[in-house]
Amino acid sequence: MNSHQMTNSGKLRHFLTIEGLKQPLLTKIIDRAELFSNLLNRNIKTIPLLRGKTIFNLFFENSTRTRITFELAAKRLSAEIINLNIHTSATSKGESLLDTLHNIEAMHSDMLIIRHHQSGAAEFIAQQVSPHISVINAGDGCHAHPTQAMLDMFTIRRHKNCFSDLRVAIVGDILHSRVARSQIQALGILGVKEIRIIGPKTILPANSQTLGVCVYHDMEAGLEGIDVIIMLRLQYERMKSALLPSAREYFHCFGLTDEKLKLAKPDAIVMHPGPINRGVEITSSVADGPQSVILEQVTHGIPIRMAVMSMLLGSKSE
Amino acid sequence: MNSHQMTNSGKLRHFLTIEGLKQPLLTKIIDRAELFSNLLNRNIKTIPLLRGKTIFNLFFENSTRTRITFELAAKRLSAEIINLNIHTSATSKGESLLDTLHNIEAMHSDMLIIRHHQSGAAEFIAQQVSPHISVINAGDGCHAHPTQAMLDMFTIRRHKNCFSDLRVAIVGDILHSRVARSQIQALGILGVKEIRIIGPKTILPANSQTLGVCVYHDMEAGLEGIDVIIMLRLQYERMKSALLPSAREYFHCFGLTDEKLKLAKPDAIVMHPGPINRGVEITSSVADGPQSVILEQVTHGIPIRMAVMSMLLGSKSE
Amino acid sequence: MNSHQMTNSGKLRHFLTIEGLKQPLLTKIIDRAELFSNLLNRNIKTIPLLRGKTIFNLFFENSTRTRITFELAAKRLSAEIINLNIHTSATSKGESLLDTLHNIEAMHSDMLIIRHHQSGAAEFIAQQVSPHISVINAGDGCHAHPTQAMLDMFTIRRHKNCFSDLRVAIVGDILHSRVARSQIQALGILGVKEIRIIGPKTILPANSQTLGVCVYHDMEAGLEGIDVIIMLRLQYERMKSALLPSAREYFHCFGLTDEKLKLAKPDAIVMHPGPINRGVEITSSVADGPQSVILEQVTHGIPIRMAVMSMLLGSKSE
C-alpha cells in the first residue's frame, strides 16, 4: 500500500497511511512542522509556499476540528481552499463518487483532503486521480488518520527529547480506532522502547503480537513506568453493540483519574485526540491538569498539516 | 460588567456591551468607522491592519446579515475568518461548549464573534478565553447587541450633527430587544436631549425611570418633535405568548405610517435594525421613503465592525 | 429582454441570457476565456483584476459544480466571494426576497450570481438592483444558463476551428432544458451550419421552426454527419410526470452508445453539462472515451466565468 503514496524518487506523493514510511521521512515532517510552528509564533502567519494552489476539503463524514485545521493550514500557506460536505451536495443529484471526483479534478485542483467513514476510501481515491493531484487521508473508517498521528508525534517530541527512551500507553477502543492504528505505526517507526495497549478484551485487536505492542487489560499495571499516555475517545456507537460495558463501568476500569495517573512516571504527559467525553474516558482534573497536552495537540495540527501539504505539493517541482 | 471589556490602561479588550463605556470611546469608534467608510468609498476595500489574524464567527443562533457584515469587515482588514455554525458542528459529538471554545482558542485564534440565544453568553465566554483573545458580542439573548447600537449611532451622526440636540424615539418591543437596550445606553452616553420609548404596556420594561427614558403608550404623542425614529422588529414568537395583540392591531397602534411620520420633525430619519416585517411595524412607503435610512444602517455595519475589530486587536500591541 | 443586459454604449452590464447578443460579443468572451485559460495553465492562478470587489453567490437552488466554479473564478480574479444559500438563511425570518436583495446591495456588493428554480428570476433581480451592481444568471428555471452555453462554445472552438462548418446535435429533453435553450441561441449567433435537436416528441419544443433547428425523433438519423453531440441530463422529476418512458426505454432510443456514436463524424466530440446519469442518457464507454470532452467542459467553466465577470465589472470603469 505504501508504494502508492511515494514517487519513484522516494518523495511523498500522497499521505494516506503511516504504514511503510521510513523514520527519516517522519522526522522530516516533524522538523518542518517545528519550523512552521516557530514562524506562527513569531506572528508570521502567512507563507506564500502554496500560492495559486487549489485544495478541496472533501468531507464525507463530519469533523469540525480536522476540517478547520486543514483549512487554516492551507490559508497560512496561501492556498485557496474549498470546503465541500459531500453528504449535502453533488451526490444528491445521483452522481457517482467517481464522477464527483473527476469533476473536482477538472476544476484545476491540486490536492484533495478526504475524510470518509469507509476504510480505504482515501487510498481508492488516490488510485483514481490524475498524476498532478495529491490526496491526504483525513481519516478513513477504522483504517488510518496519519496527520493526527503525526501531530501526536510532534507533540511528544516537544515534551520528550528522544523517542527511543519512551514507553507509551494507548488506552481504549484500539480495535476500532484509526487514530490508534496510525499512532502505533508511527511510534514503532520512530523507535520507542515500548508500546502498550490497554483496554477491555472486546475492543483490543486480535493481532496484537504482530503490531509489536504489549497488551494490558489491567490499567493500573499498564500505566506503570509510562512516559506518554494516549487516551482514545470512546465511541458511543460501539457501546450499543454490547462490545462495551456501561460508560460508568468503563470509566471505573479504564477512565484516567488522578489516582491512576500517579502510577505513570511523574513527568508523564496525557494526550487525547478529542473531542473528550469528560467523566467517561478521562476525568476533568486530568484533562485540564498540568500533565495534559491535549490543547497543544490541537494547536500542533496546524503546523503538521502545513508540513505535509507543503511536502506533497513541493515534491512535484523538486 | 464593563471592567471585563477594558484593559487596565483603559483600552477595549472585548466588546460585550455598551453599558459602562465612556463618551470619548464611543466617539472614537464612530470616528474610526468614518475613516474606514471613506476608504471603502474611495474603492480602497482592503486594508492590511489585521493581516495574519484569525477570527472565528461562532453563531449559535442564525443571522445572515450580521454574520456576513462581520465576515466582510474581517476580510477588508485582511484577516482570515472561519464561519462556524455551532448547531451543526462539534456539539453534535457531545462536546461541551467550553471544550469547543478551548479547541478554537488552540487553533491560534485571535478573536471570537459570538451570537447566542442566551443573555450573558458572550460575557461568559470572554471570562474563559486566554488573555490574547478578544470577544465581540454579536447579540446575546435579550441582553445586548453593541455593534448594532454603534452602527446606529454612526448612522445618526451622519445625518444629525450634534447628539445633544436630538430627541430619539424607539418604538416596539423594548422589553425583549437587545438592540433597544444597547441603543438606549449608547444614546445616553452620547448625551442626546431625550429618549422616548413607545409601545404597549406589556412590552415596555418595568424600570423605565432608571433607564433615563420617557415612556409613551400613545405613538402619536410620542412622535411629536422627534428627530430620530427607531422602529424595532416585532418578534412573532412573542405574539404567541399573548403579550401582544394581533399583527393587524399592533400595526394600527404602533406601525409607522406616512400619517404618523408627519407628527415627527420634517427632517426626522427612520431607522430599523432589520429584517423588516412590512405592514406590521412599518409600512412600505415609509420603509422605502426619503426619510428612511434603513439600508444605510446595513452599509454602516461594515465600517463599524472594522472599527471595533481593529481597536480590539490593536489594543494589545499599543 | 436583451436591452437590460447592455449599457447604452453597448457593453455588457448583466449577463442574463444569450438571446439578442451579437456574434462579436460572444467571440470576445471566448477570446478572453482563452487568455485566462492560458494564464491558468502557466500556473499564474491569481490575477488582480477584481481586487476589492465583493461578489455574492446567491443560490436559491443547489448546484455544487456551478457554485464552485464561480467561486474559483472570483478568487482567481482576486475578488471576495460570499456564498449564500438562500433556502437556509434570511428568508427563514420571513423577509421578502427584495428586502434580502437590497440588504445584500447595501453590503457594498458589486455582483450577484443568481441560481433560481423560477424562470425570469435573474432578470427580475437585475431590474431591481442599483446601477453599480451586475447580475449573472447561473441558471433560472427552464429559461437560460448563459455561462454554461458559453463554456460549451469555448469547448467547441478549442476542438473545431470554424463554427460555420459545424453540424451540432443536441439530444434529450430540450423542452425543459435551460442549457439547451442557451446553447441553441449561442450556436445560432456563432453561425453554425446546422443545429439538430433529437428527442421524443413529448419533450421537444413546439416552436422548433422559429428556433432555427431541425427536429429528429430518430437518433440514428439525427447523428449522421454530426461534428458535435451535446447530450442533456435527463431530469428524473420529468419522468414521473409521464412525459418520458422508463429510463431503460429512454436509453434504448436516445442514450448515446458506441454504436450510435459511430454514426456521427469520426472526429465528432461528445459533450454533456453534467451531472451524468450513466446508462441513462450516455454509456460509460462513451462518457469516458476518447471523443468525450465532458471534463474539459468543467475545466473551461472557470476561465469562461472569469471572462464574463471581468467584462461586467470592467464595463463600468471603461
Image (cartoon, coloured by chain):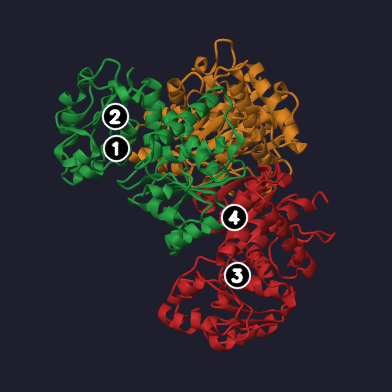
Chain colours: A red, B green, C orange
Q: Residue at x 63, y 50 (%)?
A: A101
Circles 2 and 3 on the same subunit: no
Q: Which residue is mark 3?
A: A178
Residue C193 visible in the picture: no
Contact check, label 2 and label 1, Cβ < 8 Å = yes
Q: Is residue A249 above or below residue C250?
A: below
Contact check, label 2 and label 4, Cβ < 8 Å = no
Q: Chain of mark 4?
A: A
Circles 2 and 1 on the same subunit: yes
Q: What amino acid is labelled 2 in the image?
A: Ile
Could you tell me how far apart the alpha carbons at marks 2 and 1 are, in whole angstroms? Answer: 9 Å
Alpha-carbon neighbours of circle 3 within 10 Å: few (<14), some, or many (≥20)? many
Q: Which residue is mark 2?
A: B230
Q: Residue at x 41, y 80 (%)?
A: A248
Alpha-carbon neighbours of circle 1 within 10 Å: few (<14), some, or many (≥20)? many
Could you tell me how far apart the alpha carbons at marks 4 and 1 are, in whole angstroms? Answer: 38 Å
Task: Please tell me which residue lies in front, B28 or C32.
Answer: B28
Residue C233 appears in which quarter of the rendering? Answer: top right
Q: Chain of mark 1?
A: B
Residue A69, numbered circle:
4
Q: What amino acid is labelled 4 in the image?
A: Thr
Q: Which residue is mark 1?
A: B180
Badge nearest the viewer, 3 or 4 = 4
Task: Please tell me which residue lies in front, C222 or C53.
Answer: C53
Could you tell me how far apart the alpha carbons at marks 3 and 1 are, in whole angstroms? Answer: 51 Å
Q: What amino acid is labelled 3 in the image?
A: Arg
Q: Chain of mark 3?
A: A
Could you tell me how far apart the alpha carbons at marks 3 and 4 are, in whole angstroms? Answer: 18 Å
